Image (cartoon, rainbow, N blue to C red):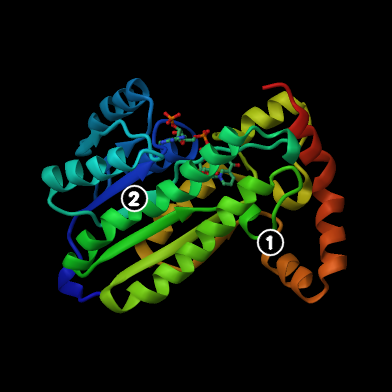
Amino acid sequence: MANPSSVPEKFTVIVTGASAGIGRLICQRLAGKNYRLVLAARSADKLAQLEAELTTTGCECISVPTDVSDPNAVEALVKTTVDRFGRIDVLVNNAGIECFAEFDQLQLDQILQTIETNLTGAIVLTRHVVPVMRAQGFGRIINMASAAGKHGPAYGAVYGATKAGLIAFTQGLRGELLPVGITATAICPGFAKDGGVYDEIVKATGKKTPFLVGGTTAQKVAAAVEKAILTGPPEMIINFPALRPIFLFRDIFPRLGEKLILAFTFKFLRRAATRKK
Ligand SMILES: NC(=O)c1ccc[n+]([C@@H]2O[C@H](COP(=O)([O-])OP(=O)(O)OC[C@H]3O[C@@H](n4cnc5c(N)ncnc54)[C@H](OP(=O)(O)O)[C@@H]3O)[C@@H](O)[C@H]2O)c1
């Protein structure tokens, strides 16, 4: 467990996928509080805009344009952070892409890009960050998974596979690193309104979210990340209605549980998969 003397007064936080959506909201939420921020994503112009905005709140912050699917860029992100701030207290692996489509219509490069961005990128970045946290005797790793990682969505098998992988990665890492003061947390949102990729899906399909997986907002997800930084829990499912009892029911009654989940989600997911992009 973390030695209290190893917990810093001000946390240095890397947020990937900071240029848009939930990542951007996480940064806006943390700025002006006790955090130094390192903003990472591919779009240098959007990061520079956000950096300028957050700096006006008094936040110490740098932007480091990074493609998380590029192992060299990921290593450089860690080096730049340590050179500038001397430590890394929190890593938020938030960068992610979706690829909802009929599975056999997916191009091979879409499949690989989704895995490399959502899963391999997060693992490789964490691999570079953990030695820094281990030397500090403190760290928080927060992985943005999804409810799709708790039950693979129809038309989102590859996306769901990356998020399930991220959940298992978080669990394994946590078990190994808790004794040295490092926690790992998986955040599992349902479809989040008002910021993020899901807004585009709703706009394109013209349909409301299914009741079962659609009662959260990007702001609530960002608030959950802040709570995870403060308390380091294993897993947070962010959705209304509560999904944990539904997954429990599915685990006990797999066929019935699957029917229930498909009854609420199938039509919407099919529309999402066949929307014009
Ligand atoms: N929105 C939801 O309803 C929802 C629900 C469950 C889980 N999630 C998860 O939450 C995370 C954020 O989603 P969002 O809704 O905020 O999506 P978004 O609005 O599309 O933002 C995605 C972010 O990821 C970055 N990104 C994509 N590919 C990248 C790469 N190769 N390297 C570095 N950055 C990359 C994007 O920036 P650049 O394009 O500039 O690189 C952008 O900043 C994702 O992991 C997503 O799977 C979202």
Q: Is residue 175 above or below residue 236?
A: below
Q: CA distance from mark 2 to mark 1?
A: 31 Å
Q: Which mark is residue 242?
A: 1
Is tag 2's residue or tag 1's residue first in the polypeptide sequence? 2
Residue depicted at 17% across the width and 66% down the height: 135
Q: Residues within 10 Å of mark 2 (few under 14, many from 20)?
A: many
Residue depicted at 73% across the width and 33% down the height: 105
> Relative to residue 270, is residue 185 drawn left or right?
left
Three-letter amino acid code of the residue under disc 1: Ala
Q: Quadrant of the N terminus?
A: bottom left
Q: Which mark is residue 167?
A: none
Q: Position of residue 134 (x, y in %)?
A: 22, 67
Q: Is residue 93 above or below residue 176?
A: above
Q: Position of residue 186 (x, y in %)?
A: 49, 60
Q: 228 or 73: which is nearer to us?
A: 73
Residues under numbered marks 2 and 1 in contact, where contact means CB atoms less than 8 Å apart: no
Residue depicted at 77% across the width and 40% down the height: 269
For the residue labelled by badge 1, is the local secondary structure a helix, a strand or a loop?
A: loop
Tell me if residue 179 can be seen.
Answer: yes
> Relative to residue 1, is residue 22 drawn left or right?
right
Mark 2 vs ligand 1: CB below 8 Å: no
For the residue labelled by badge 2, is the local secondary structure a helix, a strand or a loop?
A: helix
Which residue extends farthest front? 108
Tell me if residue 1 can be seen.
Answer: no
Residue marked by disc 2: 125
